Structure formats: structure tokens, C-alpha cells
Amino acid sequence: MNRSYFLITLFLIFTFTEVFLLAQDKKVLSEFCISETEFELYKLINDYRNDKGLSKIELSKSLSFVAKTHAKDLAENYKESERCNMHSWSNNGDWSSCCYSSDHRKAKCMWNKPEELTNYKGIGYEIAFYSTDPADLANQAEASLRGWKKSKGHNSIIINRGQWKKAQWKSLGIGIYGDYVVAWFGQENDPDGKPTFCEQ
């Protein structure tokens, strides 16, 4: 085969594959919805911010999709270790995997997930909560926010303190799966808007 034809054929194959995968991703995102508990946590976070005189953050379909995807990955694949914390991503999905350590050397692996998995153009910042306490599982929305409030680092992200003082949160995503609760904050508007509610 002529080299130029070979290269054109390869280009067409890769382009078709990329378009097909993008179409599949958009289909998944278009069918995405959030639960009542996830929406309850979204409201609780904004109520807490309102009490601090801070503006409301819009609910994001893309960041909620990323949050739910990661919560599911954590529930199914994460094993707690001294080296890899809950911001880690497994190698069991259509994303770049990484072990997120306390030195933040793999920070970009987390920050880039919204753009990697959705149409969201901008980096995201994640906070996560885990509990197997029956009382917490009975009301995960309140339990997770209560846990985040007790953690200076997590609390600072929610109410724009410390290094997050100048951050302008425009998008917020919530995902709950099993014992894991995940929230994502972003400084860009979500081109895909808000998620729908899952049918009960």
C-alpha cells in the first residue's frame, strides 16, 4: 500500500474512533441524572455558603457526572493505603489512572478529570467523604457535609477560605455511590447545564 494512503487510512480510523467514543460519552452524559440525596447535599452546601454570605453555586451536570463516576470507582476499586488517598483513580475505566499521594504530585490527574470525561472546559477540585457508620449512611447528605466542616482543608474549599479565598466557584457537582460521597468544584460554567432528577 502506498505510504500516503496508509497514513490517510490510519487518520480516518482514528478520527472515526474518536468521534464514535465522543458520541458515546455525550449519550451517557445526556442520560445522566442525580438522586434526591445528591440534590439534598447540593442544597445543604449552598445553604451553608449562604450562611457565610457567599453566593450560590450552580448545579453542574458534567461535574456531577465526574463525581458519580469517581464515587463508583472508589466503591468498586479503591483500597485504602498510606500512599494512595481517595483522590486516586483506578485503571478499571475509560480514564487516566493515578495514585494520588499526600505530596499532590499527581494533582493534574484529578484536576483534569472534568475535561477528560465531559465537555467541561476547565479544571475541577474534589472533596470526598467515606463512612460505613449506619447513622451516616441513613443520611449521607448531612453526614458528609458535617464531616467536611470538621476538616479545615475541605471546609476551606466549600466556603472559600485560605488558598481558595479568590476562587469563584461557578459549577458544583455531587455524586454518591455506596459508602462514598464526592463533590466537585469548578470555576467555569458548565456548557451542558444542569442534570435531571432520576426517576424514583
Image (tube, rainbow, N blue to C red):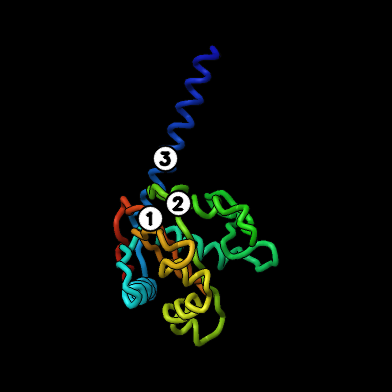
Q: Position of residue 146 (x, y in %)?
A: 47, 80
Q: Residue at x 51, y 61 (%)?
A: 70
Q: Residue at x 65, y 68 (%)?
A: 80
Q: Position of residue 181 (x, y in %)?
A: 48, 71
Instruction: Tell me the SS state at disc 1.
Output: loop
Residue picked out by circle 3: 20
Q: Are marks 2 and 1 in contact (CB under 8 Å)?
A: yes
Report the mark closest to the observer, 3 or 1.
1
Instruction: Tell me the SS state at disc 3.
Output: helix
Q: Amino acid at mark 1?
A: Gln
Q: Earlier in the sequence, mark 2 or mark 1?
A: 2
The label on residue 197 is: none
Q: Is residue 171 above or below residue 136?
A: above
Residue picked out by circle 1: 187
Q: Position of residue 171 (x, y in %)?
A: 35, 59
Residue picked out by circle 2: 123
